[in-house]
Image (spheres, rainbow, N blue to C red):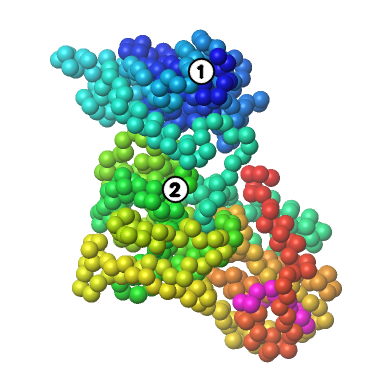
Amino acid sequence: MSAHAANTRYLIRIQLEQVVRPPIWRELVVPANISLSWLHEVIQESMGWTDSHLHQYEQGRIYYIPSDYEDPLPGARDEAKVALSEVLKKEKDWFRYSYDFGDGWDHRITLKEILKHDEGDCLRCVKAKGGDVLEDCGGPHGLMEMRKIKLAIESGAVSADWEAYENYKLEELDFENADLKFINRELGDIYSEAAERGGLHPVAAEETHGGGPFIDSDEDYDLEDEDDGFEEFMSALAGGKIDLDDDDSDEFFDEDEAESETFPEPYKELPKGDLLEFSKTLKLAETVHAVEPWKQLWDRDIFAVEDPETKELDIVSVLGRGQEVYSIHVHRAPTALAFWRSAFSAATALDPESVLKMSSMVEVEFLNKAGMDAPDLKLYKYTRQQTPPRGRHRWIRFRSYRPRCFPWFSEAEDMAVLRRGMRLALRYVELMQQSKHPESFLLSHLVPGTMPKSLKVFRLAAGAEPEGNEGWQLEDVSVDWERCHAEQAVYQPNEFECARLAKMPQQEDSWEVGTLCMPTGVMTASGPVMPVLAMACSIGTGNVPPKPQFTADVDISEAQTLWECLVANIDAHGYCPTEIRVVTHEAYEMLSPFAKLAGVRLAQFEEFAMLGQLFEMLAMMPGPDEM
């Protein structure tokens, strides 16, 4: 039988090299056409690794690596696009899988037998030898040394090396026996996940997954400051007319807004009460993971929670059905409904920049250990929370979003709202399962661009305690989506400053004045933010170089930044133009009183003639690391 025939299966042995006392290996039945990326998942679960380090495959001089490697080897192939049958073609063929290049765990993968398609399961561990393996224990030598020490202690011998390994709790480890039942349960989860994502076979091209308005919170953002390389770019763009080093110009970055090379550890030295808040939320999150509400709900199957004090609505969304991001989001009032108005009305998923500009929410996310940042791991230590057992998507981290901010570590004050959202998400699934009309709980069936006429809203009964579930009653509430807009107070320029500028001489000239929310983040004391750049550009005389105004302070609105930019340009050039052009209603409304006072024409256009091209180029500008 050809190894490439449909439904062909392989019996393979995966054995740890250099580990001989005892040997550690697994024999598995896998599809011959399983991709090497899915085989990586199978290896991790069957051997007991936590996917916390880098890996690669090697056969001769050919390497197979993940597609997201930052520094791939020349000529290496994408493991997601390669089938196992392309590498192992006949019995006794073998290749190597390396994991954790520091400790050096090398696995020899050998094709033992090519099976017929009707012989048992298609993804199953049939035999196993050797039990627990351990991350970061010093590699094969360290593992065997730990086994030796454990045997010595069990025999009553005193080992001088015991202290070096006491944190590993040797008495709880079983180096001899593999838990075949547990391994096959984990392999079953992999098979189910792969089936929902299209199968275990290789992908022919990059696959995308839509269905929601969210971005991946693990997406990499360049948080370097924009100063590096920015002056040369701007000067070239303006034909050399812009000099950001000019002593008379404002600094592009204020000293206190520039990126700090380090930031305080977010969870270090928290008060006992704050640690208790995180601890309670971690424990509840474990319950949520066990229930897996994403098996019942898509991310658009939202419900609302009425705040008992403010009577405003938070929105809860459950992610995970798409098998990419597993989390619960609690969108905070007063912007929650405005966000979801945009999400439902959009024909496709919102772009990442729009999400970041609008999002005001707190989330709990379930990840593999490799996706956790150092502070997330330390939170387990600080709260004395037991680390998760091995398995997929079991590590927990918290993130908070604010408008114009990148996701950042949550604060203790966010935890009560997040716990309420998690508890009611479980209650929502329970009520849906008990209902005679469970479809009424779902909104994901709506055609993109269609708004739901009502939302299911949890309201707290009078006298009931918010910490429990019993006092929350679920009601259908109609929503007037036309009134669900993010409230933005119009910035009011200083009257004295308006009067001063109105007295400036006027020159026949037209200025375009606008702002750009930069997609590349800047680190501040409260986390990474999307800075605002404002510019005034002459389209009349053409001899007025733009004087940019920049802020990374999220408390300073785009309208205020625009006004400050206009003031700086009028002062720098000594005159006020006879016409000012803007493209947003907010800018027009803010500048109207000044324009009337100064006798300046104020016009609102759909797009800028010159500044729009400049902003478009700036928005595509790479970060310093890409220059």
Dots 1, 2 in contact, CB < 8 A: no
Q: For the residue marked with disc 1, what is the amino acid?
A: Arg
497 with respect to 356 (left or right) = right
Which quarter of the figure is the C terminus placed in?
top right
- Horizontal and vertical percent position of residue 537: 75, 69
Q: For the residue marked with disc 2, what is the amino acid?
A: Arg
Q: Is residue 109 visible?
A: no
Which quarter of the figure is the N terminus placed in?
top right
**Residue at the location (73% across, 80% down)?**
603
Quadrant of res 439: bottom left
The label number, if any, that marks residue 84 in the structure image = none
Of helix, strand and loop, which one carries label 1? strand
How many callouts does the rendering have? Answer: 2
Q: Nearer the viewer, residue 378 or 205?
A: 205
Q: Is residue 347 magenta?
A: no
The label number, if any, that marks residue 321 in the structure image = 2
Residue at which label 1 appears: 96
Quadrant of res 123: top left
- Horizontal and vertical percent position of residue 104: 45, 21
**Residue at the location (51% across, 35% down)?**
199
| Magenta-tinted stretch | 567-587
Quadrant of res 150: top left
Q: Is residue 568 magenta?
A: yes
**Residue at the location (62% across, 27% down)?**
77
Q: Nearer the viewer, residue 296 or 133?
A: 296
